[in-house]
Image: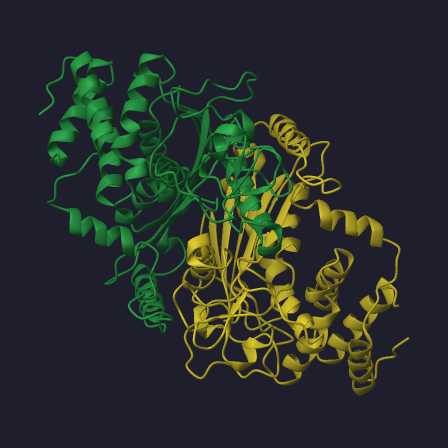
Chain colours: A green, B yellow
Amino acid sequence: MYSKDNLNEIIIKVLGKLGVPWEDGQTTANVLLAAEQRDIPSHGMIRFPDYVRLIENSRINPIPAIETIHETPSTTVIDGDSGLGMVVAVKSMNAAIEKAKNAGTGWVSVRNSNHFGIAGYYSMMALKHDMAGISMTNANPLVAPTFSKDRMLGTNPIAIAIPAGKQPPFVMDMATSSIARGKLHIKQLNGEKIKYGYVQDAEGNPSDEPGVLVDGGAILPLGSSYEYGSHKGYCMAAAIDIFSAVFSGAGFGPFVPPSVPYLAPPIEKQGEGTGHFFGAMRIDAFQKKEEFKDNMDKWIETFRKAKPAIENEEVLIPGDPERESEVKNKNKPISLNKELTEQIKRICKKHDVVFK
Amino acid sequence: MYSKDNLNEIIIKVLGKLGVPWEDGQTTANVLLAAEQRDIPSHGMIRFPDYVRLIENSRINPIPAIETIHETPSTTVIDGDSGLGMVVAVKSMNAAIEKAKNAGTGWVSVRNSNHFGIAGYYSMMALKHDMAGISMTNANPLVAPTFSKDRMLGTNPIAIAIPAGKQPPFVMDMATSSIARGKLHIKQLNGEKIKYGYVQDAEGNPSDEPGVLVDGGAILPLGSSYEYGSHKGYCMAAAIDIFSAVFSGAGFGPFVPPSVPYLAPPIEKQGEGTGHFFGAMRIDAFQKKEEFKDNMDKWIETFRKAKPAIENEEVLIPGDPERESEVKNKNKPISLNKELTEQIKRICKKHDVVFK
């Protein structure tokens, strides 16, 4: 068990030794530790050793010159110069918020970035400005479109945060695939099978084998099969890929570089790095601020009052579970498994950082 | 079998007798007949008798004063004055396109509208301006959120159209539910059962009964069950509801009025009518126009080349099936079933319009 402050310091110091400025290390730590606090450990500390290795291998640039390439009153295109995804994403989301201040809304497409952690973090940055925030990213290909054998898309998540008044905000943050890669990995480690409807084998046949990705299999889009609407999950992942990559000039679909050091970048290069897309919408660009918040409170209260189908399974408002985790975990230390702890210890030793 | 011109004339003349201006009748006919040509008959002529009855019952206003209530450089809020959904939607999408010309993007939230037919129609209006188009709407409640007994959301569709160069555009148009109401209706008429994973009964239990909506049952969100991600379908339908209704002041969730004359409006009123949300994004607000189109061509070509999992089931690009239908149906008459033909004949007789 490690305190948040402790891990925060380790992240900043290790990244500092690799040339990452203090402020950028802090940004990275903020996003990784928010994932831990929100009980999304698949996007938390477990990613840190990958980022370190990718910097060591010159696949992430520790001192990127993040640049605006193109803009209009409501849009910006940013080149992340291969920086840490969190650093590029925070700057880009702030650019969207700045655009929205004048134009009502702001939309930023980003190329040449890297894995950015939890999408929800950036969408929520809009809330304190009384704006709705949108955040999406493409990712290295693991998902097969409906009727395809090939992995063409990432688990491409989208997050949308909308402010309310007395109620906590609406915050959705979801992958567009039927299952997360992290969950498959855990099942595989436990030697368990999975139900059908999550993955297919290399020939495109339904599979119950969680390790199928290693042998050329693929994750299925949200909807799981054509008859239950997997073409809709495919459509959403595709649109997120296009907004993130074709709008910015990033690598799209099969050309998105992997976010882990043990996988080589794709041989054929198409576009620059990972792509993201961010939006900020001033609520008073649509309604009077107080009226908007009142109506959003009513929306949330109405949905919270829906009759539950299963006892003790309350109808949830998007954002409820993660917010409850944050409250529960506020002053609790973060637990890391043994393997991850050892990895971080080795990294600290290598870079001469004290691991307490 | 009836020619497109024939049906076009009937729509305009009948609506004209009810006070709808010629131009607005033409707009309505364009959208209804586009649905027929694109092989989406659930949103085509079958809706026409409903619209007629709703105008007769003063639930749709034939001569609406469609008004801009609020705007910023990139946003507009429009009150549809209870007009025909198609008429309100075309004006609103044009407003989004106008905003995008100056601001780079345009975003329009709409209240006090009605059923607008196929969402894809409006998103595609952006294409000829070299813009990407987005269109969504809420709808009367038929879908239960994950863990809820109650119907709280419509089948809330989203459409996204993105221009390409030599390739035809990317056009997705999808409900966020696991199945369309129309498909359930056909199964019910045929006395067939359906597979589990599409609907639940009034107590929230899984059901294989397509007529379950009549007895207080509900359609399940895309994903079908919590374990396969129905909370993601719920999130999407919820976000579409909020953009369409909380952003505009329309009725949200359970307060969206029904789009059929045989269902009464909700007793408790909250907001004004049905809500829509439209977006237009100039592609040259992000990339040089030709570069964008080249990359979009590459995106489409790459995905079309994905290895098919099933013989004769080519990997599709969103928009392929509907476009192929349009080509196939271009000069073919439209077939209406007997019941619908009789309904239209009765309407024509009542309003003194010749039915050929």
Towards the viewer: A53 or B94: A53
Residue farthest bottom in this picture: B350
The percent position of residue B109, horizontal first and vertical second, equals: 48, 58
Location of residue B9 with respect to A74 vertically, above or below: below
Out of A280 and A174, give the one closest to the viewer: A174
Q: Is residue A132 visible?
A: yes
Q: Position of residue A350 (x, y in %)?
A: 19, 12
| Residue drawn 49% across the image and 50% down it | B107
Point out the residue furthest to the right here: B356
User: In this image, A111 relative to A84: left or right?
Assistant: right
Left or right: B5, with B94 as reference point: right
The structure residue drawn at horizontal position 71% and vertical position 34%, both measured from the top left corner, is: B167
Q: In which quarter of the image is residue B294?
A: top right
Above or below, B27 relative to B54: above
**A201, B30: nearer the viewer:** A201
Residue B180 appears in which quarter of the rendering? Answer: bottom right
Q: Residue furthest front?
A: A191
Residue B25, picture quadrant:
bottom right
